[in-house]
């Protein structure tokens, strides 16, 4: 233990060797070293950590549910408050409209917008009994007809404005009529163009149909011509095959080389096409005869060689016997 505590201190010498048995005992002592990992403790820590996380999630979920419930209640309370406020405002407005009109206010005479317009003029004329010497309502050069003239001018202006509006309306109506006429003209042109396009399309369709019919007829004619050409070619091939197989000239038959002056002994060199079947048969018979003769000669040679070999064997046996007698 003292050496273990001295490790890392200046008094511990590096070259000094430690006893292996003591080192092994120290390393295997559970008080100083634990071999491997404590899996049970780690698993318990993991389970505890997971349980804490689950508890936190459940607590957050309960908080969220409680907050949602409170939010719903607050929204409901706000709606009820707004509804009550609207009803109160509506009742107030209905009460003001029914019981507290502007004409019933005490200050209506002061706040009446057209009070001066509907009031009696201060002076209705030169002989107004309400006016006295001290009223100061009659002046030199005063025109009492100014109001009438102003009304007349305003009437004339209104009449002129109405006339201008009428002219403007008439001009707008004319423009609308012109636009309608222009639209009708454009529609007529469009209809005419549509009819022309339809006629052109029908003409093109008729032309295409006629071209299709002509092409079909031409195709049928070409097909008939092709069939007739095929028939003619077939007949020509049959005639050519017949001539090839039956014509002595085309088939190069040996009979073309017969000399009519001496048919048995002479041939026409310019028409010689080979031997006759009888001549070929004579050649084959002669070759067969030669093969038979060759086979006979070979057999005779084999017999002669065998006889010579037997003679030599007998002679050798005889010599061997004589030699053995001598010895």
Image (cartoon, rainbow, N blue to C red):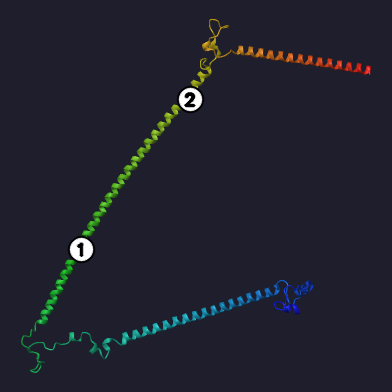
Q: Residue furthest top?
A: 261
Where is the N terminus found, in terms of image quarters?
Answer: bottom right
Distance in Å between CA atoms under marks 2 and 1: 88 Å
Examine the rendered structure and indicate whether residue 307 appears above or below residue 51: above
Where is the C terminus found, in terms of image quarters?
Answer: top right
Foreground tag (2 vs 1): 2
Q: Residues within 10 Å of mark 2 (few under 14, many from 20)?
A: few
Q: Nearer the viewer, residue 275 or 67?
A: 275
Residue 173 badge: 1
Measuring from the top left, give residue 39's x and y in whole percent.
70, 72
Q: Nearer the viewer, residue 130 or 321?
A: 321
Measuring from the top left, give residue 174's x and y in whole percent.
19, 62
Examine the rendered structure and indicate whether residue 192 appears above or below residue 171: above
Q: Identify the residue at image location x=65%, y=14%.
A: 284
Mark 2 highlights which residue? 234
Q: Residue furthest bottom?
A: 134
Q: Quadrant of residue 322?
A: top right
Would residue 276 appear left or right of 308 to someone viewing this image? left
Q: Quadrant of residue 293?
A: top right
Examine the rendered structure and indicate whether residue 119 appears above or below residue 182: below
Would residue 152 appear left or right of 194 to someone viewing this image? left
Q: Identify the residue at image location x=27%, y=89%.
A: 104
Q: Earlier in the sequence, mark 2 or mark 1?
A: 1
Would residue 224 appear left or right of 259 to someone viewing this image? left
Measuring from the top left, give residue 51's x and y in whole percent.
63, 76
């Amino acid at each position: 233990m003292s050496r273990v505590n001295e490790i890392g201190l200046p008094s511990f010498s590096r070259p000094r060797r430690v006893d292996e048995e003591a080192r092994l005992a120290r390393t295997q002592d559970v008080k100083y070293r634990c071999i491997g990992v404590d899996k049970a403790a780690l698993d318990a820590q993991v389970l505890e950590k997971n349980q804490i996380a689950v508890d936190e999630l459940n607590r957050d979920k309960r908080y969220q549910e409680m907050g949602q419930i409170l939010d719903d209640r607050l929204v409901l309370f706000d709606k009820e408050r707004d509804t009550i406020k609207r009803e109160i405002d509506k009742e107030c407005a209905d009460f003001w409209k029914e019981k507290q009109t502007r004409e019933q206010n005490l200050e209506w005479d002061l706040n009446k917008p057209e009070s001066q317009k509907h009031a009696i003029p201060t002076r209705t004329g030169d002989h107004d009994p309400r006016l006295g010497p001290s009223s100061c309502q009659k002046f030199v050069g005063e025109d009492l007809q100014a109001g009438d003239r102003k009304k007349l001018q305003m009437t004339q202006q209104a009449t002129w404005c109405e006339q201008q509006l009428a002219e403007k309306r008439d001009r707008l109506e004319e423009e609308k009529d012109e636009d309608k006429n222009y639209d009708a003209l454009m529609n007529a042109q469009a209809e005419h163009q549509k009819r022309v396009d339809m006629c052109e399309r029908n003409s093109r369709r008729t032309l295409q149909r006629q071209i299709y019919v002509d092409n079909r007829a031409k195709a049928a004619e070409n097909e008939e011509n092709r069939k007739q050409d095929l028939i003619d070619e077939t007949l020509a091939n049959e005639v050519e095959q017949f001539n090839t197989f039956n014509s002595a000239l085309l088939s190069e038959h040996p009979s073309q080389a017969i000399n009519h002056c001496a048919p048995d002994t002479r041939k026409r060199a310019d028409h010689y096409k080979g031997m006759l079947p009888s001549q070929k048969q004579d050649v084959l018979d002669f070759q067969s005869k030669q093969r038979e003769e060759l086979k006979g000669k070979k057999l005779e040679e084999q017999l002669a060689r065998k006889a010579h070999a037997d003679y030599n064997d007998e002679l050798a046996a005889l010599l061997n016997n004589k030699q053995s007698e001598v010895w």
